[in-house]
Amino acid sequence: MSPYPLAVPTGYRVGPWTVERPLGAGAFGSVYAAVRDAGPGELPPRAALKFLPTGTRTPRQLRHLRDLAEREVELLGRLRSPRLIRMYEALTVDDPAHPELDGATVLVLEEAAESLQTALPRLSATDRARVLAQVCEGLAQLHGAGWVHGDLKPGNVLLMADGSARLGDFSTASELDGTHAYSPAFATADYTPPELLWSEFGEHGTRIRPTADLWAFGVLAHLVLTDGLPLPGGTPSARRDAAVRYARGAEELRLSPELPAAWREIVADCLSATHEDRARRAGRTAEPLSARVRAAAAGRPPRRPRRRALAAAGGVLALAVAGLGVTLLPDERPPGSPEASGYERCASRSVCFFSEPEGGGEMCAWDGDDPDWFDGVSDCAWAAASSPRSVYNNGGPDPGGYIRVAYFARIGLQNRLGCVERGDRRNLPAEPGVRSHTWAKTC
Ligand SMILES: Nc1ncnc2c1ncn2[C@@H]1O[C@H](COP(=O)(O)OP(=O)(O)OP(=O)(O)O)[C@@H](O)[C@H]1O
């Protein structure tokens, strides 16, 4: 039997496309390389045709397949982001002479060279880290647009001819409706977060949140960086049982010793056992995670603060470390003394932003990056209502040279507003507000 759910012969024509050779197959889709010999000039000369057998099968299978096809067409038709595979058009096969193909949905996609699944054994450590950073960027773009992927795994990461990565297979993707989306729940067990392993499949599907993709990213990163899955067991069902034991607190997570140090905290945060812990440690979406993953891939020391942002309101200092799974290192000291005022409240090795000029008013302080001030590493609540009016870079020396601080108007380090040299303290203009910052080598 063909491993392809839909066997399409070489030379088969659909619209302007002629099938050349098979590229890969999943549970539902059969993907073929194709060339264009006619049709509108804006279409590329080559593409990957994904055939979904929506014309055959039993009515029940059909309903499900149509749902998968519609999800993919809907998402790809509406979203265009550099890290998501593009769709050029969607066609329906009209060919009563070939009943097995008649009525099939054909997605005409940007052609990738291969999937991460097949490429992985040949990739160097540097390439593996780079691909992970690009996958996380793709997830951040997807989440930023309000969608959840729902089936992130090596077969759904596509590598282009230039080696860059894109996310593919959006048949399980779903658009967020508030905090949740409804997925058809065909995610792969090894990449499914514990809370979804026993979740109910309701009328509209399984309720999932973007943190489900973060769990899958943690599993993927562990696999890509160590060639092994994070949970023990020789079969998917043994690993699912291990996930259940882990989620119930009966078993600890033991990450491979081969996992590079820069990635351990990222993977552990993504593999937090519950949605709540994952959201707190890794973020509610991939957007805050992306900067950490980029830094790890670039070999920079993780800039995630070891403590939460230090907020001082009305001169009362609060060390807010609880709840992040975060410990203060013995050599860390609290920011300035409680009697300190103005800029002097800012602890060494921190960057501090103040709600008033000259270091006055409320303060938010970090010793690391924060790609989203309101929903990232920490919540700088007052900055949501008013923009910071002064800043003090009280950072220390850094072996990598990341001693300056660049700050941005938008989450994810976008729309750069300015940069502060080490030791610099200055007033800021009233608008616009600051949403993210990063330690930088140059200003
Ligand atoms: N745009 C593309 N370019 C090249 N190859 C592709 C492309 N899209 C998919 N493939 C190949 O086809 C395989 C199956 O595609 P895809 O994952 O989209 O199908 P599926 O049936 O939806 O899979 P799943 O079993 O994950 O639901 C991929 O693993 C990859 O090898």
Image (tube, rainbow, N blue to C red):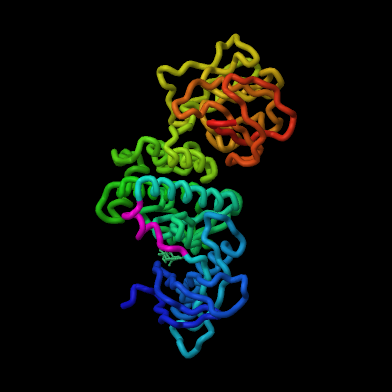
Q: Identify which residue, 229 or 116, lies in the foreground.
A: 116
Res. 400 in view: yes
Task: Report x, y in % for residue 293.
Answer: 46, 41
Q: Is residue 411 above or below residue 351?
A: below
State the image quarter where residue 80 is shown. Answer: bottom right
State the image quarter where residue 372 is shown. Answer: top right
The residue shown at (37%, 56%) is 189
Q: Identify which residue, 46 or 370, lies in the foreground.
A: 46
Ligand 1 resides in the quarter of the picture at bottom left
The residue shown at (51%, 71%) is 46
Looking at the image, how many numbered discs can be counted on the residues? Answer: 0
The residue shown at (65%, 15%) is 342
Task: Report x, y in % for residue 74.
Answer: 58, 65
- Residue 119 among magenta residues: yes
Q: Is residue 53 left or right of residue 394?
A: left
Q: Magenta span covers which residues?
A: 112-123
